[in-house]
Image (cartoon, rainbow, N blue to C red):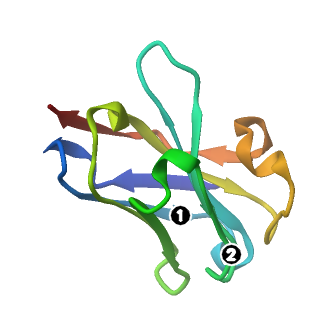
């Protein structure tokens, strides 16, 4: 059974930084694509970022490019999301996701429907 456990959320002021972590179990972590989505109150789930099995390929939503960095440690079965220059509009529940492929070059990366397992989410609140 696949489990994804997120941590690192919290309350931060505008312009601050947070680092989210997601530790996976029940899968061959080094062979799968990992990512992050977020959902703000009253809004649909939104793509944040993904990283391929090796850590070489990444993708970011346009609004997060240059501010967020995704990385992974295959030895620790953990994926990270370093968030900097946070804004109030980044306030959301951030969820870790996994898809049982090494990578994809298509737009399917951006749809939450294409992911196989989700974590429970961690709340990020950015105060103005």
The residue drawn where x is 61% and y is 80% is: 55
In the rendered view, tell whether residue 17 sits above or below residue 80: above
Residue ID for mark 2: 57
Bin the neighbour count of mark 2 within 10 Å (Cα to Cα): few under 14, some 14-19, many 20 and up.
some
In what quadrant of the picture does the C terminus appear? top left
Q: Which sits in the foreground, 56 or 128?
A: 128
- Picture coordinates of residue 46 (x, y %)? 58, 35
The residue drawn where x is 82% and y is 49% is: 107
In the rendered view, tell whether residue 29 sits above or below residue 20: below
- In the drawing, what numbered circle is on residue 24? 1
The answer to whether residue 51 is left or right of residue 21 is right
Badge 1 marks a residue whose secondary structure is: strand
In the picture, residue 18 is in which quadrant? bottom left
Q: Which sits in the foreground, 27 or 125?
A: 125
Residue positioned most to the bottom: 75
In the picture, residue 90 is in which quadrant? top left
In the rendered view, tell whether residue 115 sits above or below residue 30: above
């Amino acid at each position: 059974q696949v489990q994804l456990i997120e941590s690192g959320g919290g309350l931060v002021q505008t312009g601050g930084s947070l680092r989210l972590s997601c530790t996976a179990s029940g899968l061959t972590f080094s062979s799968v694509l990992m990512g992050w989505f977020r959902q703000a109150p009253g809004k649909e789930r939104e793509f944040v970022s993904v990283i391929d099995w090796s850590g070489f390929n990444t993708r970011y939503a346009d609004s997060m490019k240059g501010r967020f960095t995704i990385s992974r440690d295959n030895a620790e079965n953990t994926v990270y999301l370093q968030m900097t220059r946070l804004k109030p509009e980044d306030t959301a529940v951030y969820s870790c996701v996994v898809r049982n492929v090494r990578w994809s070059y298509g737009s399917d990366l951006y749809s939450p429907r294409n992911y196989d397992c989700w974590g429970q989410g961690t709340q990020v609140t950015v105060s103005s």
